[in-house]
Image: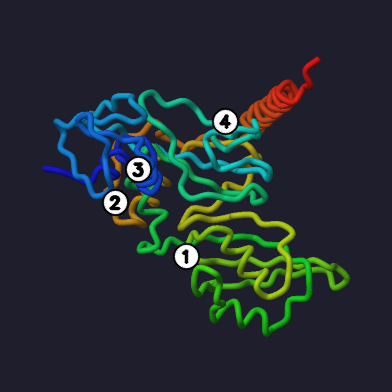
């Protein structure tokens, strides 16, 4: 049976469906030697190439894997950066014959929970608006937030790409003399900079933004910024169930790593070493020629 080309590529761990659609439009994909177009369907016997490189298509799908990453501010959600800046993919473990797919994006100034998977179908469903997977953010606002502003953000605000709103807004206790106020907000879409744009539409400024939850999965509280942990079967299947995918029975991680003192110390050392190396590489890139 034939399947959509972008779905086949995603299921082989090349990237998300949305990413594959862009690559098809850019002419980077070929089927049996011909440049592919959106809408193409392929069979198991068809030869697929990405940027001229042959794609091996296994009849047996490798076990689904999911990483939780605590993204720091200053990292880009892209695989490579021409300027040599840090990206969220830099420290992820290598997987033979596959690629990690980011489930959604966080802008360079946003930190917090970011998921990666080798399963293109899982990534697509978690991101697709039809599944209405809720995201939660902790947001620090600079400016006076009035009851009218909160009502507007709950009822709906017209942005450049349509009406948007928060599903829920929780006001966190704050010092009366503070010029900043913290809120927890939830929404069920992943539009570009949507949380920031909603607040900015009301004339206030977001001074800090942290994603704390994706669907039913909350950020592990002790996970250091810049570090990752692989989910066990129970947590991974909770994500799959949420988007109507069958449970996995195989896993690389049978029990979740305990974030004890020894594990946390190793994680922090690894993150510091990576940052030091990245700074040294950047200085070498910008070093003026004599």
Label 4 – label 2 distance at C-alpha? 29 Å
Tell me how far mark 2 sits from mark 1, CA to CA.
19 Å
Label 3 close to label 4 by CB (< 8 Å): no
Give the residue pinned by disc 4. 90
Q: What element does badge 3 sit on?
A: helix
Q: Nearer the viewer, mark 3 or mark 2?
A: 3
Residue 179 in the image: x percent, y percent?
Answer: 84, 68
Give the image location of residue 237, x and y in percent.
36, 47
- Tell me which numbered mark, 3 or 4, is placed earlier along the sequence: 4
Q: Residue at x 40, y 53 (%)?
A: 126
For this orientation, the residue located farthest to the right is 177
Q: Secondary structure at mark 1?
A: loop
Mark 4 crowd level (few <14, some 14–19, many ≥20, 10 Å Cα)? some
Q: Which residue is mark 3?
A: 120
Distance CA(mark 4)–CA(mark 1): 28 Å
Give percent across and percent down for residue 107.
60, 50
Q: Nearer the viewer, residue 289 or 171?
A: 289
Q: Do labels 2 and 1 touch, CB within 8 Å?
A: no
Picture residue at 56% right of the left edge, 72% below the top: 159
Mark 3 crowd level (few <14, some 14–19, many ≥20, 10 Å Cα) = many
Looking at this view, is 125 or 108 the one in front? 108
The image quarter containing residue 28 is top left
Q: Are marks 4 and 1 in contact (CB under 8 Å)?
A: no
The vertical placement of 176 against 253, above or below, is below
Q: Is residue 245 above or below residue 286?
A: below
How is the model colour-coded? rainbow
Disc 2 or 1, which lies upstream in sequence?
A: 1
Distance of label 3 from label 2 (alpha carbons): 12 Å
| Residue receiving disc 2 | 245
> Which of pointers 4 and 2 lies earlier in the amino acid sequence?
4
């Amino acid at each position: 049976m034939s399947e959509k080309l972008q779905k086949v590529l995603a299921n082989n761990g090349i990237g998300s469906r949305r990413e594959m659609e862009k690559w098809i439009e850019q002419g980077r994909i070929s089927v049996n030697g011909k440049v592919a177009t959106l809408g193409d369907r392929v069979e198991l016997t068809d030869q697929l190439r990405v940027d001229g490189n042959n794609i091996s298509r296994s009849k047996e799908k490798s076990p689904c894997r999911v990483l939780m990453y605590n993204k720091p501010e200053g990292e880009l959600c892209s695989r490579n950066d021409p300027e040599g800046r840090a990206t969220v993919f830099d420290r992820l473990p290598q997987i033979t014959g596959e690629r990690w797919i980011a489930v959604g994006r966080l802008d360079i100034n946003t930190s917090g929970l970011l998921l990666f998977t080798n399963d293109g179908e899982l990534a697509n469903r978690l991101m697709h608006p039809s599944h209405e997977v809720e995201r939660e953010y902790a947001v620090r606002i600079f400016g006076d937030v009035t009851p009218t502003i909160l009502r507007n953000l709950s009822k709906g605000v017209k942005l450049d790409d349509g009406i948007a709103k928060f599903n829920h807004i929780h006001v966190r206790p704050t010092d009366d003399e503070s010029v900043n106020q913290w809120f927890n907000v939830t929404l069920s879409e992943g539009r570009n900079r949507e949380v920031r744009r909603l607040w900015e539409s009301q004339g206030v400024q977001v001074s800090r933004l942290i994603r704390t939850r994706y669907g039913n999965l909350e950020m592990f509280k002790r996970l250091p910024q810049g570090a990752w942990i692989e989910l066990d079967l129970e947590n991974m299947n909770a994500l799959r169930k949420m988007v109507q995918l069958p449970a996995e029975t195989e896993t690389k991680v049978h029990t979740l790593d305990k974030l004890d003192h020894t594990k946390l110390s190793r994680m922090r050392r690894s993150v510091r070493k990576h940052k030091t190396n990245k700074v040294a590489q950047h200085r070498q890139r910008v070093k003026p020629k004599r």
